[in-house]
Image (tube, grey):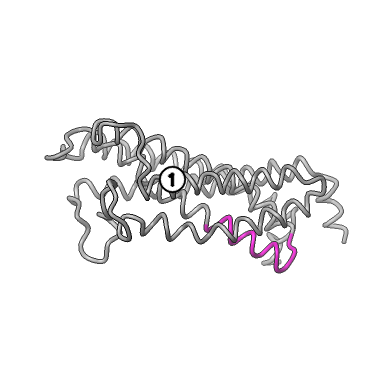
Amino acid sequence: MAWTFLTTRGLDGLAARWAPRLLAVSALLLVAGLYGGLVLAPTDEEQGEAYRIIYVHVPAAWLSLYGYVAMAAFGAVALIWRIRVAEVMMAAAAPVGAAFTALALATGSIWGKPMWGTWWVWDARLTSELILLFLYIGVMALRAAAEDPRAGARAAAILALAGVVNVPIVHFSVEWWNTLHQGPTVTRLAAPAIHPAMLAPLLVMAAAFMVYHAGAVLLRARCLLAREPAAALAEEAA
């Protein structure tokens, strides 16, 4: 009974029950985080009000990496154990992760224009993040291009696993190379180089984005299952 979520019917029930709740919680956290970041947090001495874009940019960047690792993990399960639910979750996670990656790139460019004087530079962090977006798109394209959905899912899973090598490159690029992008301020081993009044709403926003990611992936998984009822019924009958 505890493993019913490994069936398509179980996943559909899980998504129906939890997706709306997760999305509602994420909305509440989003309101709290934006109010704390845009209203309550003090103005930065060096960047002025422009720094406030971090309350969207930084959580989006974190979720772009987290989402890719989650997608690749589902892909690994799908490849090793041939579990269709893992294939569905991988397919559901890809566009959500791609959206967070695109949001991170867009907000980074908006911040970079007043800080660097240009919308884009071929910086190590920006370039590796752009490659991450292309990997997400590649996973979606491979799955969609195959005539056999199961074969497409396997090909997409292989690409997702191969692309995992880019995740640490994105994360450590500001430490491995001399880049324009600022170094880590929250995730470094020493005390975060950010005022607690600024850090608190940032963490709330990160929680909001993470909860939203979970809810959106479950909701999309349910949509994917609804599009393939014959395959789902065949699996349940097997």
153 relative to 99, above or below: below
Q: Which residue is mark 1?
A: 209
Residue shown at 30% from the left, 59% from the top: 175
Q: Residues within 10 Å of mark 1 (few under 14, many from 20)?
A: many
Between residue 60 and residue 114, name the one nearer to us: 114
What residue is rendered at 43% in x and 45% in y? Answer: 209
- Along the line of sight, the residue nearer the viewer: 160 or 216: 160
Q: Where does residue 43 sit, x and y in percent of width and height? A: 16, 37
The residue lying at 46 percent from left, 49 percent from top is 64
Task: Tell whether position 222 is magenta.
Answer: no
Considering the image in quadrants, where does the N terminus appear? bottom right
Closest to the observer, 217 or 101: 101
Image x and y of residue 154, in percent? 72, 57
Numbered marks: total: 1
Q: Residue 19 is drawn in which quadrant?
A: top right
Q: Secondary structure at mark 1?
A: helix
State the image quarter where residue 163 is shown.
bottom right
Which part of the image, by quadrant, shows the C terminus? bottom right
Give the left or right position of residue 86, taking residue 186 as reference: right
Q: Reply yes or no: does residue 77 show up in magenta.
A: yes
| 89 w.r.t. 101: above or below | below
Q: Residue furthest left?
A: 45
**Residue 136 horizontal/vertical position (percent):** 57, 47
Three-letter amino acid code at the position of disc 1: Phe
Image spot of residue 142 (x, y percent): 69, 47
| Residue ID at (58%, 55%) | 71
Is most of the magenta stretch helix, strand or loop?
Answer: helix
Magenta stretch in the rendered image = 69-83
120 to 211, vertically: above or below: above
